Amino acid sequence: MLLEARKHPLLERAYARYGRWLLRRAFARVWLGGEPWPPGDGPTIAFLNHSAWWDPILALFLSHDLFRRDGYGIMEGEQLESYPFFRRIGCFGVSAESFEDVRAMSEYAARLLTEGAGRTLWIFPQGELVPPRTPLSFRSGASRLARTVPSAPLVPVAVRYEFRREQRPEVFVRVGAAVRPAAGASAAAARDASPLAVTRGLEQRMRLELSALDEDLLHPVPSEIGYRVVLDGRRSLSALYDRTLGRLQGADAIGR
């Protein structure tokens, strides 16, 4: 059975605010780099690697706060039945994995994307939470959506959670150039494209983005290579200590 989204704008804003508070509390900062979001109000599909519990909260922050998109997400039907609140912020899914249910979900996703302006579907093609830097293996959901909504570019969003010079980890997000499987082809040709070939192509794009992000992480100053802080978190104890010690040393120097 298809469990449709029942989005409520006020609840979505409230949960986005709560998610932003959680991110600030848990991380030193969130960095954003890579390509700009595709321009215009057309539909987009964002696909992310899935290595942390934080991924859906981060996706909501990116969609709602940064890119100002009308965001939706796919969630397991069992979880939606246990936590129906998530339908109120744009999540949907199916209660079974039958062919009919999967087809109904794809058709519903296509309607969602095309019936409103500025809509983005955020998906995790790995289908489950896996340890960081595990070899990528995508399921076919993204390729099915690419066939049902050939006009929607697929945007790779690579994410890493890294401990560097802070007490708390930092989040690094790299947006890749949009993938357009239907570019230069008719809608019929896009629908006839091999789902396996599209899936493997998306896997390869995500590998390239993650590899580029890992290369970026070797640089000690992310702002020098195009990254910007989009969310500041709580100060670490070391930063507070350095700040306090600096004030005390400055006051001592003045007293002398």
Image (cartoon, rainbow, N blue to C red):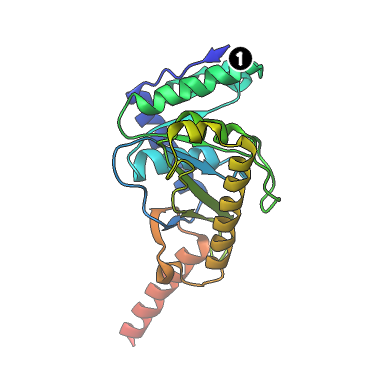
Instruction: Identify the residue at image location x=56%, y=70%.
Output: 218
> What x and y, as percent, mark residue 55?
54, 41
Q: Is residue 33 visible?
A: yes
**Mark 1: few/some/many CA within 10 Å (<14, 14-19, 20+):** few
- Which residue does the numbered mark 1 point to in the structure image? 100
Q: Position of residue 18 (x, y in %)?
A: 42, 35
The quadrant of the rendering that contains the N terminus is top right
Q: Residue 171's x, y, as percent?
A: 51, 54
> Quadrant location of residue 213?
bottom right
**Residue at x 67% of width, y 48% of height:** 136
Q: Position of residue 172 (x, y in %)?
A: 50, 56
Quadrant placement of the C terminus: bottom left
Decide which of 104, 225 is in the foreground and name it.
104
Q: Is residue 244 visible?
A: no
Amino acid type at image mark 1? Glu
20, 43: nearer the viewer: 43
Q: Is residue 70 left or right of residue 97?
A: left
Outermost residue, top direction?
Answer: 1
Residue at disc 1, secondary structure:
helix
In the image, farthest residue toward the bottom: 256
Please, is residue 44 above or below residue 249 in the view? above
Does residue 68 sit above or below 91 in this rendering?
below
Q: Nearer the viewer, residue 243 or 31?
A: 31
Left or right: 19 in relation to 166: left
In the figure, is residue 3 to the left or right of 70?
right
